[in-house]
Amino acid sequence: MDSPTPALTGEDRLWGALAHLSAFAIYFTGVGHIVGPMIIWLWKRDTNPFVAAEAREAMNFNISITIYAVAAFVLCLTIIGMVIGIPALIFLHTFQVICIIVGGLKASDGRHFLYPLNLRLV
């Protein structure tokens, strides 16, 4: 679903991009990467289908990354698991940052962005 959505205003594209980029709130609060997209989704879900879809996708992705990071952290609790866990945590963080930026750029162009490795929980 990478085609432009017709009849989107600049405001729609801005909110779609903010739905993705709000995940960078993790650097200010511990759960901002989930709460940011959730607030936008709750606010816009009944009035703007494009923004709601982008926010839901971003929220699901950040919940998925959190689940994967917890699993990688648990692996780090053993010496043998550190061999897998530490590189996994580094990869997950880098992957998350890149995907958030790409999602924001696609949404600002009016295109839906589907995150890879995303568990669709919401």
Image (tube, helix red, strand yellow):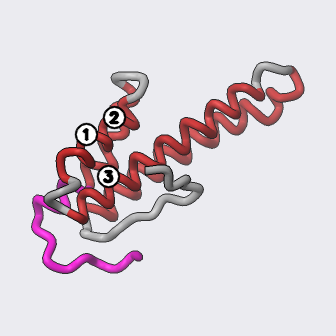
Q: Is residue 53 above or below residue 55?
A: below
Give the left or right position of residue 111, taking residue 71 as reference: left
**Quarter of the image where one finds residue 2:** bottom left
Residue 15 percent across, percent down from the top left: 19, 53
Q: Secondary structure at mark 2?
A: helix
Residue topped by disc 1: 39
Give the left or right position of residue 88, taking residue 48 as reference: right
Residue 92 percent across, percent down from the top left: 60, 41
Residue 115 percent across, percent down from the top left: 48, 59
Q: Earlier in the sequence, mark 3 or mark 2?
A: 2
Marks 2 and 1 in Cβ contact (< 8 Å): yes
Q: Earlier in the sequence, mark 1 or mark 3?
A: 1
Q: Secondary structure at mark 1?
A: helix
Task: Check residue 1 in the rendering and tell me which mark sits there, or answer none.
Answer: none
Q: What segment is highlighted magenta in the picture?
A: 1-16
Give the left or right position of residue 68, taking residue 48 as reference: right
Q: Is residue 57 above or below residue 39?
A: below
Which residue sits at x=59%, y=56%? 117
Q: Secondary structure at mark 3?
A: helix
Query: For the residue carrying disc 2, how many other residues have a C-alpha within 10 Å: few (<14), some (14-19), or many (20+)?
Result: some
Q: CA distance from mark 3 to mark 2?
A: 10 Å
Residue 11 percent across, percent down from the top left: 11, 59
Tell me the amino acid under the disc marked 1: Ile
Marks 1 and 3 in Cβ contact (< 8 Å): no
Tell me the amino acid under the disc marked 2: Val
